[in-house]
Amino acid sequence: MRDNMILAKETSAGNATATGPVTCKCCGHAFAGKYCNQCGEKVIEPRDLSVRHYFEEIFNAFTSLDTKVWRTVRLVAQVPGGLSRAYMEGRRSPYLKPLSIFFLANVIYFLLPLFETFNSRLQTQLNGRPHSRIATRLVDEYIREKKITRAVFRERYEAKSTENAKLLLIVLVFLIAVPLGVINRGRQPYVAGHITVAFEIMTFNLLFNAIALGVVVYAIFYAGRWLNIEGVEPLLNALVNPFVFVTNGYFLYRAERTFYGCTPRGSLWRTVLIVPSLFAAVGAYRIILFFATFYALG
């Protein structure tokens, strides 16, 4: 009920008031109001061309909670699955599309060089992974052929992997959509629905588990070093994975109820199955990342 109230409130925000008959400068359609109901073009008023208006637009873009960006982020956090449901039901104008907010979050993540949540170091790729034996053989052959040291190869590989890890995140979206579609078979007739939820899940993880959590972790880490507090880094490493596990469980449970319409019990058992599948999808993504990075080195 509360989720429905939030969705209803958000959807009704921003309705224009009628002003009188106007001819749209863009498409020529006659309409009443501030926005053309044919193409969505806004009626330009003298104040819209003032310098003051430009500064107001800049200020509002960064501070207003009624803009599409903040409204969409708030919905993703408060009502997991709500953005996907609104999109699939055709209530799209109040929010950014799931694909758009995903790319926006990805751009922010890409521009923050400290955060490598979805990357995997060469040492990790070569040890204890399903593809590690093949990866090790390929690396050894490459080093012999190019006549370089392993240290040189590692430097080149990890620089390229850091770049590719952020560019290939869209692959992870489709990997996540697979278990969503299998476990929720019959509850969503369109494959696009599962993909839409996967985009929302990745947006949630980028914004809150990669960027926001990353800022907090780095702040605590450097504060600990500045105050000469020992044991901060191991403690943070021990807490991050459980935190990510819990937040994804929260998101999926709510999304199962909001988007797929499951009962509390049905949402619970589906969440128990899907959360490990998410981590398996990340593992598959990192395998793809290794081979994409290796062959990109030339």
Image (cartoon, rainbow, N blue to C red):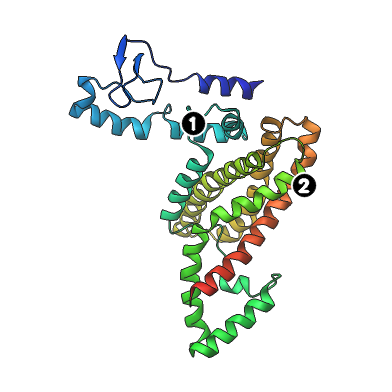
Which badge, 1 or 2, is on the more N-terminal residue? 1
In the rendered structure, are the residues bearing label 1 and label 2 in contact, judged by CB atoms less than 8 Å apart? no
- 42 and 215: which one is in front? 42
Near mark 1 (Cα within 10 A), the count class, few <14, some 14-19 or many ≥20, is many
Tag 1 residue? 95
Q: At label 2, which amino acid type do we have?
A: Leu
Is residue 205 shown above or below 11?
Answer: below
What's the CA distance linking mark 1 and mark 2?
30 Å
- Residue at the disc numbered 2: 273
Quadrant location of residue 51? top left
Q: Residue 229: give x, y in percent of width and height.
A: 52, 58
Q: Please tell me in which quadrant of the rendered image residue 14 appears.
A: top left
Q: Residue 120 vs residue 61: left or right?
A: right
Residue 166 seen in render: yes
Residue drawn at x 48%, y 75% as measured from the top left = 297
x 50%, y 18%: residue: 12
| Amino acid on which disc 1 is placed | Tyr
How crowded is the residue under tag 2: few (<14 C-alpha within 10 Å), some, or many (20+)? few
The quarter holding residue 264 reads top right
